[in-house]
Amino acid sequence: MEHETFFTLMMDALDGELAEDGRAELESHLRACPRCLREWQALSTIDALFRQTPALRPATDFVQRTIALLPDRRLRLWTMGVMYLFLLLSGIIPLLIGAIVYTLLRPAFSQPTVWESLLQSVEKIFQVMGTVLNALFISAGEFIGQNPAALGWLLVMIGIVSLWGGVFRQAVIQPGQISS
Ligand SMILES: [Zn+2]
């Protein structure tokens, strides 16, 4: 069988739709073929990341179907790598920025007047954000109505946010259990 056929088997396996003989066939090929094994590891890692939260299932299926549509297996691996990096960065960058801002502004925070003006500007920012978000949601609704695929990516984005919420909670509340 061609490597391409095994990619289809991997997709079925992740969907839980691979029969016993297909699974045995895939496993024996993975033992013999490092290329397919790498692809399988990348696929199942991403799959596991997405499936940590049941609400992510639509996003997972969408990602797998999108990746399966790509014609070239190198392109598929590359896309998975980028997605994986993107997942990592999308969680790490806000934390980094938060840490940097906190470190830079910490001396100023000890002065009460700074807190007051900060609270006032936060209030203003929320007012502006409310208006902007309102407009965004209205136009996003129209956009999704015209481009159903955008809903898939929206699910992926929501998935990333809740995924990192879960990873963060695990890391903070139960350190050491994150790698299990
Ligand atoms: Zn192979």
Image (cartoon, rainbow, N blue to C red):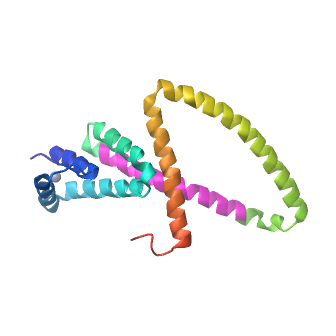
Residue placed most toward the observer, 90 or 103? 90
Asked which quadrant contains residue 58, the reply is top left
Residue 56 visible? The answer is yes
Instruction: Give the percent coordinates (x, y) of residue 157.
Output: 50, 45
Q: Is residue 160 above or below residue 168?
A: above
**Does the magenta-highlighted stretch encompass residue 169?**
no
Q: Is residue 163 above or below residue 108?
A: above
Q: Is residue 16 left or right of residue 19?
A: right
**Does the magenta-highlighted stretch encompass residue 80?**
yes
Q: Is residue 15 left or right of residue 178?
A: left
Q: Residue furthest front?
A: 54
Instruction: Give the percent coordinates (x, y) of residue 141.
Output: 56, 29
Q: Residue furthest bottom?
A: 176
User: At x 26% / y 40%, what residue is drawn?
Assistant: 72
User: At x 52% / y 69%, what residue is drawn?
Assistant: 171
Instruction: Give the percent coordinates (x, y) of residue 136.
Output: 63, 33
Instruction: Give the percent coordinates (x, y) of residue 118.
Output: 83, 55
Residue placed most toward the observer, 115 or 106? 115
Q: Is residue 21 left or right of residue 94?
A: left
User: At x 28% / y 58%, what residue is drawn?
Assistant: 41
What are the residue bounds of the magenta stretch?
A: 76-102
Q: Is residue 138 above or below residue 45?
A: above
